[in-house]
């Protein structure tokens, strides 16, 4: 028999507090997962990935850019040149034509004599050499 003085025990008023402990654990787990998600998204920012992708080859001495033919991501690999300056080089080239001399690069805003001196070992004006043609084996005709 039940008396009026007895109140039913529900999860919120459980004297052991187990329900509250479970809710606290779930909340902590949710916050932890949210933190990992935010960190993962921050690590995959497009700008950061692009910057990591724009790394010159390990052998800097052999790295050559054909300034009149290569695209801006390749030009951006040059020392002291990033994506913004590489795009300015491309814009200058589109408006004024091919660079006739390396010194013409100083006409691009952001490239001065010091930058040009660092670029000289890596920049060529001549067209990129074509890949050798593949020769097909001779097939005897039937």
Image (tube, helix red, strand yellow):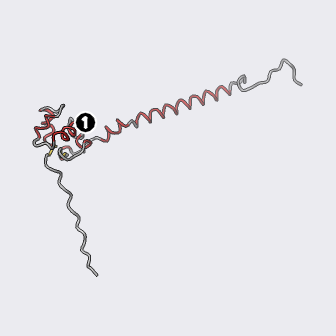
Residue 58 percent location from the top left of the image: 24, 44
Q: Which of the two residues, 140 or 27, is positioned nearer the viewer here?
A: 140
Q: Can residue 64 be seen in this view?
A: no
Residue in the image at 83% along x and 20% along y: 6
Residue 125 percent location from the top left of the image: 13, 46
User: Disc 1 marks which residue?
Assistant: 82
- In the picture, measured across the screen, residue 33 lies left or right of residue 44, that is right
Outermost residue on the bottom side: it is: 142
Residue 34 percent location from the top left of the image: 51, 32
How packed is label 1: few (under 14 Cα within 10 Å), some, or many (20 or more)?
A: some
Residue in the image at 18% along x and 39% along y: 95
Residue in the image at 72% along x and 26% along y: 11
The quadrant holding residue 83 is top left
Q: What secondary structure is marked by label 1? A: loop
- In the picture, measured across the screen, residue 51 lies left or right of residue 33, that is left
The quadrant holding residue 20 is top right
The quadrant holding residue 113 is top left
Outermost residue on the front side: it is: 95
Looking at the rendered structure, the number of numbered marks drawn on it comes to: 1
Residue in the image at 29% along x and 41% along y: 54
Q: In which quarter of the image is the C terminus?
A: bottom left
Outermost residue on the top side: it is: 5
Residue 111 percent location from the top left of the image: 16, 33
Q: Which of the two residues, 43 or 59, is positioned nearer the viewer here?
A: 43
Q: Is residue 131 visible?
A: yes
Asked if residue 134 is positioned above or below residue 138 in the image, the reply reads: above
Q: Quadrant of the N terminus?
A: top right
């Amino acid at each position: 028999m039940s008396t009026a003085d007895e109140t039913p025990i529900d999860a919120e008023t459980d004297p052991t507090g187990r329900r509250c402990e479970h809710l606290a654990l779930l909340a902590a787990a949710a916050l932890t997962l949210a933190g990992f998600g935010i960190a993962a998204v921050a690590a995959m920012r497009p700008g950061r990935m692009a910057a990591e992708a724009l790394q010159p080859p390990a052998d800097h001495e052999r790295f050559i850019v054909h300034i009149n033919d290569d695209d801006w991501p390749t030009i951006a690999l040059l020392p002291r040149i990033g994506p913004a300056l590489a795009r300015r080089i491309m814009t200058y080239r589109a408006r004024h034509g091919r660079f006739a001399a390396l010194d013409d690069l100083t006409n691009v805003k952001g490239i001065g004599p010091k930058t040009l001196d660092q670029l000289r070992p890596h920049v060529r004006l001549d067209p990129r050499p074509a890949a050798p043609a593949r020769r097909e084996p001779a097939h005897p005709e039937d």
